Image (spheres, rainbow, N blue to C red):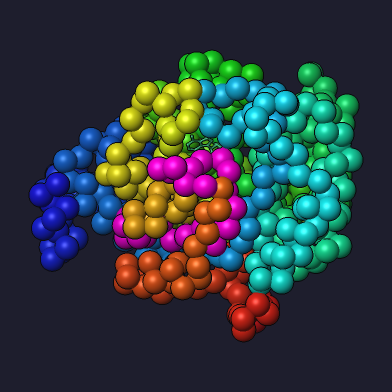
Amino acid sequence: MSSLRTSNAATLEESAHSDPNLADIRRRALAGERLSIDDGLALYESPDLWGVCTIADEIRRRLHGRTTYFNINRHLNYSNVCALSCKFCEFYRKRGDDGAYERSLDEIREEARGAMEAGATEMHIVGGLHPYLPFDYYTDMMRAIREEAPTLHIKAFTAVEIVHLAKIAKVHKRDDPAAGIRSVLERLKEAGLGSLPGGGAEVFDDRIHDEAFKGKIRSDVWLDVHRVAHELGLNTNATILYGHIDNRRERLIHMDMLRGAQDQALSRLGYAADVAGAITLTGAGAELPTPAMSDRGGYFQTIIPLPFIPDGSELEHLPGPSGLENLRTIAIARLMLDNFPHVKAFWIMQTLAMAEFQLCAGADDLDGTVVWYDITKVGGASTHQETTVWDLQKAIRDAGLDPVERDTLYRRVERKGAQWRLAE
Ligand code: V47
């Protein structure tokens, strides 16, 4: 803590000096070298938290300067009915339970129209694994939003939902899951799906899977869904849900698996790998992937570290990660995920005040105006969890950074009130 209080005035070298390990990690990170899991552990165990954050900030500034993205979006949960009962989840209900809901297509149309009229650029849609809704409900949902709000980008369905939809659509094959995944993604894309969010990844580890979210797809299938999406030219995001029954090494292995998957995506885009097969974007002069490359494939845009929110879940007796652990984890995600262009602070789960810190520790993106959010509710919040553009911009400026509005694919947006267009 003492370095956190005093190091604002310190130079980077002085800051990194308080833990001799950091100077070497910093040198290698800045040279665009891939950090190992042991490096990640050294960052987690370093007594100099602010030194760790400062190195992450230096990498983030190399990639984005002072530019800090935010977006005007709406989250929509079409149903909380779920066949699974994950222990960390407060959101799911069983059919017939108090509070179980399914949104009708008319309600979704209305929500989409309202979002477009308010100037949103994105609709982020996820739900439970609903046992009875037919596959047409999902493609009709995409088409209804397309018709009602053609300017909204539809970012929808976690990898877990995609596999569930393959089963509902009766195209899932046990011996060839990728074929069913491809068929579903093609049909959803044709109906209007624009990209996949990063949810449902949790922690890529069989022990944690079996203890906390048994029944959900495992890491190999989650990664398959994102690979197939990339092959179809869809960009996707990734998450890690940490701070419950996981340990720090398991988080680092998760990050390592994600960057391996991104190596594959970037190599499809024509990026050259080093002798160990790694493609990093953090060295001097590396070019970030852009949506213009999507004829060659999609890629992971952003990592969103999600701190476990115990409230109301079966794991409510656990304390959840501390604010300092959240800060450290976002900084480490920036340093380990050397081939992810962006690191997102999701203020709903971090609080806006903590998210501001995170912008100084590796994050370059703040999601978003949100409006409705049912999956987690910190400290008794309701589903109406909205912030204003003014507040997002203020948080970014207060961190000494420059707010830039983006669309879902990280293209700059020019805006006059609710009217917007992509910058030239
Ligand atoms: O899939 C569930 C997680 C995810 C809890 O892609 C929990 O841009 C913390 O994925 N505590 C949904 N996390 C959120 C998500 C997301 C959010 C913002 C942006 C993007 C993006 C993706 O939240 C779920 C699950 O992994 N989750 N319960 C909990 N108690």
Find residue 134 and report its image quarter.
top right
Residue at x 52% of width, y 47% of height:
382
Task: Classify the position of the C terminus by image quarter.
Answer: bottom right
Q: Name, please, the residue furthest toward the front.
A: 98
Residue 203 vertical position relative to residue 138 in the rendered view, above or below: above
Looking at the rendering, the quadrant in which ligand 1 lies is top right
Apparent side of residue 60 relative to residue 111 in the rendered image (left or right): left
Q: Nearer the viewer, residue 212 or 80?
A: 80
Residue at x 44% of width, y 24% of height:
315
Q: Nearer the viewer, residue 275 or 164?
A: 164
User: Residue 52: image x %, image y %?
Assistant: 25, 49
Apparent side of residue 175 relative to residue 218 in the rendered image (left or right): right
User: Residue 350: image x %, image y %?
Assistant: 40, 49
Q: Nearer the viewer, residue 303 or 232?
A: 303
Q: Nearer the viewer, residue 2 or 52?
A: 2
Residue at x 74% of width, y 60% of height:
112
User: Residue 6: image x %, image y %?
Assistant: 11, 58
Can residue 347 be seen?
yes
Apparent side of residue 30 relative to residue 218 in the rendered image (left or right): left
Residue stretch in magenta: 356-382
Residue 405 vertical position relative to residue 361 in the rendered view, above or below: below
Residue at x 41% of width, y 74% of height:
402
User: Is 358 contained in the magenta span?
Assistant: yes
Can residue 159 be seen?
no
User: Is 380 contained in the magenta span?
Assistant: yes
